[in-house]
Image: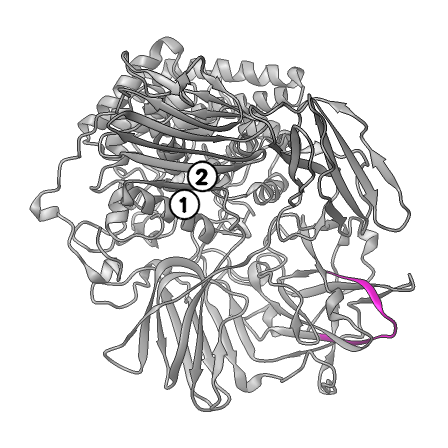
Amino acid sequence: MTGAAASAGLVVASIRSHQADHVLTSGAGPVRLTWTLRSTDRPAAPQLAYEMEAVATDGSERRWTSGEVSGDAQVAVTAPDGPLDSREIRSYRVRVRSTAGWSGWSDTVRVEAGLLDAADWVGDAITLPADPGSTTPSPSPMLRQRFVVDRPVRRARLYVTSYGLHRITIDGSSVTGDLLGPGWTPYGKRILAETYDVTELLGVGEHVVGAVLGDGWYRGRLGWERETARSTYGTQLALLAQLELTHDDGTKSIVATDGSWRASTGAIRRADLYDGCDIDLRRAQADWDRPGFDPSTWRSVAVVPLDTSLIEPRVAPPVRVIASLACMITPLAVGRGWRLDAGQNVTGWVRIRVRGSTDATVTVRHAEVLEPDGSLHTRSLRSAKATDTYVLAGSDPVVLEPSFTFHGFRYAVIRGDIELLDVSVVAISSVDEPRSRFACSDPMLERLHENVVWSLRDNFVSVPSDCPQRDERLGWTGDAQAFAATASLLVDSQAFWSSWLRDLELEQDPVLGVSTVVPDVVVSGEPRYGRAGWSDAATIVPAAVYEAYGDPEILRAQLPSMRAHVDSLDARRGSDGLLPEAFQFGDWLDPDAPSDRPWLAKADGRYIANAFLVHSARLTGTAARVLGRPDVAEPYEHLATEVAAATWTTWAEHAVTNQTGCAVALELGIAPDAERPRVGEALAALVREADGRVATGFLGTPLVLPALSAAGRFDAAYLMLLRRQVPSWLYQVAAGATTVWERWDAIRPDGSIHDGRMRPFPDDAEDADGNMLSFNHYAYGAVVDWIYRHVAGIAPASPGYRSIKIAPRPVEGLDRAEASVVTPYGQAGISWAVGSDGLRIELVVPVGTSAVLDLPVSPDSVVTLDGDPLAGTVIDAGRHDLLVTNPRIVPHREAAAPSADTAQPANAGARGAIEAW
């Protein structure tokens, strides 16, 4: 929320609470405020003190103030009034003092609490009686209630949760743009409730509240075992809703779900996240959720037990529509139909407007890529049908789109005896608030950045999933930890991660540790818990979020989980002080591993496990120190030191034989200081000998470029980053990718599509019986964090960018780059270009922060700041111009071109319609 409070010295430019965008109400706990400053002077005077004020909005005129508090805190500062009660609304503002005196007050930010206590819920959870969906995919239940508003309404709130998904209307109007609510959580441990402001929908008179339910994650298919994948959490869908009206005269009334509601079914005959949606418009009940409809044929609802003590307000952003994309349409050569190309791999669905006749059937099937013959590639969907069907009820034009499902796709085939009037592709995500921007003189790097952003959007749908298209879409912890820093950089994902980490802790076993996927479904047997680099999401994700946003609340909330995770690993150590042999996913999808056994990486799984134990122990110790708990920190720091020494002693020689081994030794602090130069040179040599070929999997890839840059080997880092041949990041771009692939060679240089064959894990089966091939996996996109830090040259030098590291490393062939990041203190930015006079850098350093310079200088460089000789390495807030003469430019040689027999063909089927780079 922006402010315009004027004063001498400092101005409070904006203020916000800890609530995420598109979330009306907060959960339990104190309110935390963050504000940005603007300076009327240059250089900016520092904030010396602040005062926060809270005001109740219930007419009581209660007011709280922090009084003058000395210090420069601006981020996640606890408000002075204590936690809110259920339904309570308060407004907040802040002012600051500098040497020029007090600023004016900021604009106000409003915070409203949801229903925080189990007793706040007064209704019953209800459903369609004798719902056949308990055993097989069936029509979506429809629920309705008529009510009368007899006096004007001042404020109206609809609180709602459900087993399964829900869509709510009042008088036929949707109460929200949110989708797939209330989202996916471990329903037996935590259920989310949503709050909607419906004041504008409720005048005096008759009204109807209506709801449609979908199977979703609660009762729909989950995982790849078709026979057992249904009804993971329960067999009965249910709606719990509470409409609370505050009238102009101060009185209140409630319309809650109970046995008086009525139930039926309609046009939605089946809706499943994996298989798609079947809609029969002949079964539609027109105006069923509006006043005047006759529900005499509807049945009384059934009441479903629901433990309200498990309910808490949803604090993470909802799933919403983020884009509508135009498509390229091609008539099919055979049969009545069309193939569409959205030009972008997305998560969402196809919206079409058609004209046909009664009983005409329309089908829409989806795929990420095309076969060489131009048909849809559906093998990688495995058992997911990814098909929506519609039966028309008349000849009038009608808009068709599915409910309670989504697909991962770029292409679709539409079939039906219809006239196709209009087509668009709807993209959805839980996160789309951009936090950063990157551009450079290499269009392939720019496209790589865009691909990573799209994979992030496409997979952050309620949980951080591995892929959005096949019969999986699970919250794999290994993928999440690998990508957490990059995700936190690219979009505002703080609340999203906080919610998911809450579920991680709820699913955590005190002995077995963190589950491999969160929520914990599908995976069974030995791989279910405590896998190296996967379970470490318990420590790595909170640390990444804290570094990105500077709010220690994530550490405070997760420290018990972090400690429990490390303790569970510590308890497994053997007499040698190390974790014993066990199945590990390890450096999953190492390109040199057997294609059908992606866990058999070059880096020893036991070495990886112990290295991540070291890393998690250190992160836990650091978190404890941030929170002022040195007594907690010391045992974990000691554990890390002990295990690191034993790990190095055991695997020192093995570590330097492969890229992941070296990267882990350097980035996870396994190699002693005296050995780090040797390991860095070994890693650089491995990269040079491989001509920049990426030889790392899910765990090694986020670490390999940081390890090279930490060793000062930017030549090797750029050789790998800018490589165009397979396997590499830019090979995917050159092959027409618009998102990040799961396998480095998902489309091979000859244009063929990888068969994706995979044996069951652990390695206990003779024949491969699985298929693992996705064209939308974000894990390898972790490289974007390195691109910001070293290509653009901007990174947090302290949590939340209070101190900003400026360290561009220009490379031959790349003559300009720019990036910006919306930090908690305001937007920080860098733009640099190499010209005849040297390296010119433009910086924007927000008020309240400083920049630490690490510039690419050579022995004869001269550096000026705003026209004057640079006097130090730390610069204050403001806009600055730097010039570095004779800068050090990283040398770069192109990787060897592929031979003629392996050169990439322009395979229109595999590449789609995108232009070749």
- The image shows residue 366 at horizontal and vertical percentages of 38, 66
Instruction: Say if mark 2 contacts mark 1, CB within 8 Å.
Output: yes
Residue 148 forms part of the magenta stretch: yes
Magenta span includes 714: no
The spot of residue 162 in percent (x, y) is 67, 61
Quarter occupied by residue 373: bottom left
Classified by dominant secondary structure, the portion drawn in magenta counts as strand
| Residue position for label 2 | 483
Q: Residue placed farthest to the top in the image? A: 674
Image position, residue 761 (x, y; %): 39, 44
Residue depicted at x 30% and y 60%: 369
Label located before the other in sequence (2 or 1):
2
Question: Label 2 amino acid?
Answer: Phe
- 373 left or right of 538 in image: left
**Where is residue 296, by image quadrant?**
bottom right
Residue 587 visible: no
At which x and y percent is residue 791?
34, 32
> Which residue was labeled with disc 1?
778
- Whether residue 787 sits left or right of residue 179 in the image: it is left
Comparing 38 with 571, the one in front is 38
* Cα–Cα span, label 2 and label 1: 7 Å
Q: Residues within 10 Å of mark 2 (few under 14, many from 20)?
A: many
When the figure is inspected, residue 478 is found, relative to residue 757, above or below; the finding is above
At horizontal 21% and vertical 54% (from top left) the residue drawn is 916
Secondary structure of the residue carrying tag 2 is: helix
**Residue at 26% of width from left, 68% of height from top?**
375
Q: Pointer 1: residues within 10 angstroms few (<14), some, or many (20+)?
A: many
Q: Looking at this view, is 874 or 161 the one in front?
A: 874
Span highlighted in magenta in the image? 144-159
